[in-house]
Amino acid sequence: MRFSAHGYSAVFVMLLVCFGFNVSKVQAFQMDRINGDNRYETAVKISQHDWSNGADAVVLTRGDEFPDALAGAPFAYSKNGPLLLTDKDHLTPITKREISRLHPSKIYIVGGPGAVSKSIQSELNSSYDATVKRIAGSNRYVTAARIADHMSSDRAFVVNGSRFPDAMTAAPYAARHGSPILLTKENHLPLTTRGALKAIQSTFIVGGSGVVSHSIVTQLPNPTRFSGDTRFKTSADVAERLPMGDPDHAFVVTGSEFADGIAGAVSAAKSNDQILLVEENYVPNAIKIAIHRRGLKSFTVFGGYNAVDQYVDTELSLPIQLLLVNKHRGIPSDYKADHLVKPNVRFPFSADIPKRYMSSMAAGHLEEMFDDAWDQGVELYAVSGYRSYNRQKEIHERITRNQGAAYADRVSAEPGHSEHQTGLAMDVSSPAVNYQLVESFANTEEGRWVKYHASDYGFIIRYPEGREDDTGYKYEPWHLRYVGKTIAQYMDRTHKILEGYLR
């Protein structure tokens, strides 16, 4: 078991149990955090965790700008030493104390005097009984190439030198496999990078064509690209296609700042784990799906709550249950919910067609809700559950064609943006409105019962009355979405919609 900062994992699990989450699932989930009061202290905490008995080598780089640090993680791993951060003009006190504790025989400065000053190099020489060496070039591209000179590999990672997230995503795998990270511009391969590639037989490009153009890729030896149209989708693509040794655990870091992830990448490589990028207060859908597909159950966050807040923890523990699908956040066209089943409830039709199905995660709760409703004389019917990307495309195009784009945008999701594709949604109705999906359902006995009782079974009315500006869709009293009992009841009490709950 990995360390637990301040008993955080145990407390989190206890809270989940107290709030009614399934105990067997909770026991399988673990959440840890390595953090300090700032990026310099976080890097020190990482070092203390992984090099508790000291280290023969330390790699030092500037903490407030990323260019020289981008390629530093694989080099630090190759030297079996931590990557520590400093201010530009003076050696940060907490970093100085950590170097003293580590008692290295070698200290490597990554970056030129403009990044880590000559006075810091002099202080290192005078303060420690260690050989101090600087690896630097006239710019970030040259520095990365010179780091590559100190590594022996026939494969290199290539990333855009102006974008740290892709390098952060690549760093653990690159480091673990001894591959350097080389830098390029979007449409120009620097001469120094060309030179470094002469000894390379294959390349992994991390980032889409908007950051590393196709013309660059054609100049690389045996290239393979890992990408998405956001930094988070790129991170998910790497996680799924370049899995590392630990099948259950991953590190988590903000995709908005470089420092925690660059320092943490060495730790991730050391434990043979990947780094996943998240937003400060939200886990993007691509990452949630990657977590689910990989079966990840244990996470360590690099950085404090100002970098990755505590609400992210809940989303990591329930990645599919808390998918946020709306006009702005979608899911891939090939995404299909696992374990689609036919809930044993009444439908107004007998055909065995896809909309009769929903995720097994939600189906049992729907059955329980329907059983209780019918026991109370409430004639509730299920009308439409799972819907594939292609089926949603047909529906949206038909509505647009018949009633115009403006109307379609209010009542129908574009393909890839429909909750029905998650398998967690079910539209319901009753004989009182002839099984139709209409607003007047809200005024029926069944509609009122659903409004007051759905949350008791883990469902929310996804598009409530008066919230069209927030959800993007007109009031749909029939559209139920499974989020889990505890969360649904909380949202009901506080009148939150899913966008508000997930911030």
Image: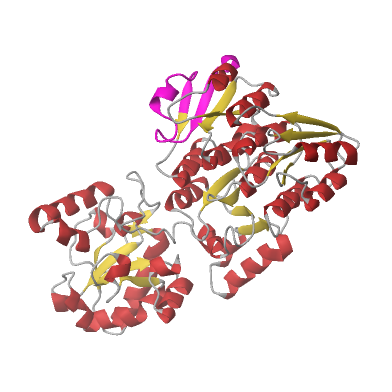
430 falls in the magenta region: no
Q: How is the image coloured?
A: secondary structure
Is residue 470 visible in this depiction of the protein? yes
Nearer to the camera, 391 or 38: 38
**Left or right: where does residue 419 sit relative to residue 272?**
left
Say how many tags the image has: 0
Is 264 above or below relative to 185?
below
Please state the horizontal and vertical placement of residue 309, each as a whole percent of the image.
57, 62
**Left or right: where does residue 77 sit relative to residue 184?**
right
- The residue sitting at the top extreme is 198
- The residue sitting at the right extreme is 129
Q: Which residue is rendered at x = 45% and y = 50% of the image?
A: 289
Nearer to the camera, 164 or 373: 164
Is residue 378 visible in this depiction of the protein? no
Figure quadrant of residue 194? top right
Is 247 above or below relative to 490?
above
Q: Which residue is rendered at x = 39% and y = 76% of the image?
A: 455
Please state the horizontal and vertical placement of residue 407, each as a whole percent of the image.
15, 61
Report the magenta residues as a range: 198-224
Please state the horizontal and vertical placement of residue 14, each as a whole percent of the image.
64, 70
The quarter of the rendered structure image containing the C terminus is bottom left
Nearer to the camera, 462 or 282: 282
Is 231 above or below relative to 371?
above
211 falls in the magenta region: yes
- The residue sitting at the left extreme is 402
**Left or right: where does residue 194 sit relative to residue 387?**
right
Please state the horizontal and vertical placement of residue 17, each as a whole percent of the image.
59, 71
Q: Which residue is rendered at x = 77% and y = 36% of the image?
A: 118
Q: Which residue is rendered at x = 23% and y = 78% of the image?
A: 379
